[in-house]
Image: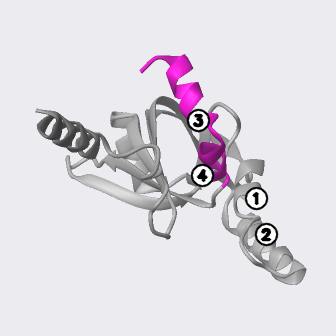
Amino acid sequence: MEPNEISEVLNRPLSREMLARDLARLAYVAKDGTPRSVPIAFTWNGSQIVLCTSKNAPKLHALRANPMVALTIDTEVHPPKILLVRGRVELDVVEGIPEEYLTMNGTYEMTAEQRVEWEAEVRSLYDGMVRIVVTPTWAKLIDFETTLPSAVEELVRERAERQNA
């Protein structure tokens, strides 16, 4: 997929809504060769998806060995809205807590008091973190109104050909 095609998908209004959500599912291949899919908080910086994790997270070993990932961001309503992104990660070890981590976790419902306690706990637990920066290499938005999964699009096309024959 060309960069302009990726940008076109990610700049659609519905994609922007999806990129403003709290959680994505990060899929990658573990060191033992088996697939993994984990929910993880994220933020969109306009060109990349940024995730943060502890410096001892098992997924880091796998991502160093194979930096290709897939992300799913979706809704819990019918019909679902789904943003699928594939990309390559870069790992950035940082001292302290990345601002993105504090921002991406700021949308959860917390009182001001809970927020202060949460942030103090985070700062006491982590001496540093790893930013997992995903540069999209492919993207697809599925809304089940104007866009469908490719297999369903194929079935719709085949049905129309049968009906027109």
In space, the residues marked 3 and 2 are separated at their CA atoms by 31 Å
Image height of 100 relative to 161, above or below: below
Q: Looking at numbered disc 1 in the image, what kind of residue is underneath it?
A: Leu
User: Can you identify the residue that label 4 sits on?
Assistant: 18
User: Can you identify the residue that label 3 sits on?
Assistant: 10
* Marks 1 and 2 in Cβ contact (< 8 Å): yes
Identify which residue, 138 or 63, lies in the foreground: 138
In space, the residues marked 1 and 3 are separated at their CA atoms by 24 Å
Q: Find residue 84 and report its image quarter.
A: top left
Q: Residue at x 34, y 35 (%)?
A: 65
User: Can you identify the residue that label 2 sits on?
Assistant: 119
Percent coordinates x, y for residue 58 in the rendering: 40, 55
Q: Residue at x 17, y 34 (%)?
A: 164
Percent coordinates x, y for residue 49 in the rendering: 59, 41
Dominant SS in magenta: helix
* Residue 81 in sight in this render: yes
Mark 2 burial class by Cα count in 10 Å: few <14, some 14-19, many 20+: some
Mark 1 burial class by Cα count in 10 Å: few <14, some 14-19, many 20+: some
In space, the residues marked 1 and 2 are separated at their CA atoms by 8 Å
Count of picture labels: 4
Residues in magenta?
1-20
Q: Nearer the viewer, mark 1 or mark 4?
A: 4
Question: Quick one: quadrant of the C terminus?
Answer: top left
In space, the residues marked 4 and 3 are separated at their CA atoms by 9 Å
Question: Quick one: quadrant of the N terminus?
Answer: top left
In space, the residues marked 4 and 2 are separated at their CA atoms by 26 Å
User: Can you identify the residue that label 1 sits on?
Assistant: 102
